[in-house]
Amino acid sequence: MIGKIIVHGDTRDQALARMRIALSETVVEGISTNIPLHRELMVDAKFIEGGTSIHYLEGWLVSTSAEFETRYAACPWLNCCCWRRKTASRTRPMR
């Protein structure tokens, strides 16, 4: 991890708006990042509505996997997440 963006606001809507601004102004050169993924999450209707669990991202990636694997192929974090999802069904649980 190179950095983390943390925002706050008096309301969820205000915090989301601030995060959208922060992500739009963030520039990291020389490496690929998952910033585009976070930008898309910030405009996802279910995420904006709230009430999502810690497993929401995984389900969201499953529903958009082909599109995201193509668009964010250079993102190491996303590649790892997609690889884990693909191989999870082929591996046996540890005993």
Image (cartoon, rainbow, N blue to C red):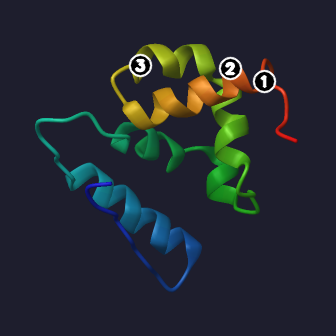
Q: Quadrant of residue 62?
A: top right
Give the residue type that dot 1 points to.
Thr
Count of numbered circles in the view: 3
Q: CA distance from mark 3 to mark 1?
A: 27 Å
From the image, state whether disc 3 or disc 2 is nearer to you: 2
The answer to whether the residues at label 2 and label 1 have Cβ atoms under 8 Å apart is: no
Label 3 secondary element: helix
Which image quadrant: the C terminus?
top right
Query: Residue at 78% across / 24% down in the picture?
Result: 91
Q: CA distance from mark 3 to mark 2?
A: 17 Å
Task: Please determine whether, in this image, residue 29 is positioned above or below residue 86.
Answer: below
Q: Is residue 4 left or right of residue 81?
A: left
Q: Is residue 42 something that shows in the picture?
A: yes
Mark closest to the chain's N terminus, 3 or 2 = 3
Task: Please give the residue where the numbered disc 3 appears in the rendered image.
Answer: 71
Query: Residue at 70% across / 57% down in the picture?
Result: 54
Query: Tag 2: Cα neighbours inside 10 Å, few (<14), some, or many (≥20)?
Result: few
Q: Position of residue 64 (x, y in %)?
A: 63, 23
Task: Please give the residue where the numbered disc 1 appears in the rendered image.
Answer: 91
The answer to whether the residues at label 3 and label 2 have Cβ atoms under 8 Å apart is: no
Task: Please determine whether, in this image, residue 38 is positioned above or below residue 2.
Answer: above
* Residue sticking out furthest to the left: 30
Give the residue type that dot 3 points to.
Arg
Give the residue type that dot 2 points to.
Lys
Q: Position of residue 32 (x, y in %)?
A: 26, 33
Q: CA distance from mark 2 to mark 1?
A: 10 Å
Task: Please give the residue where the numbered disc 2 appears in the rendered image.
Answer: 86
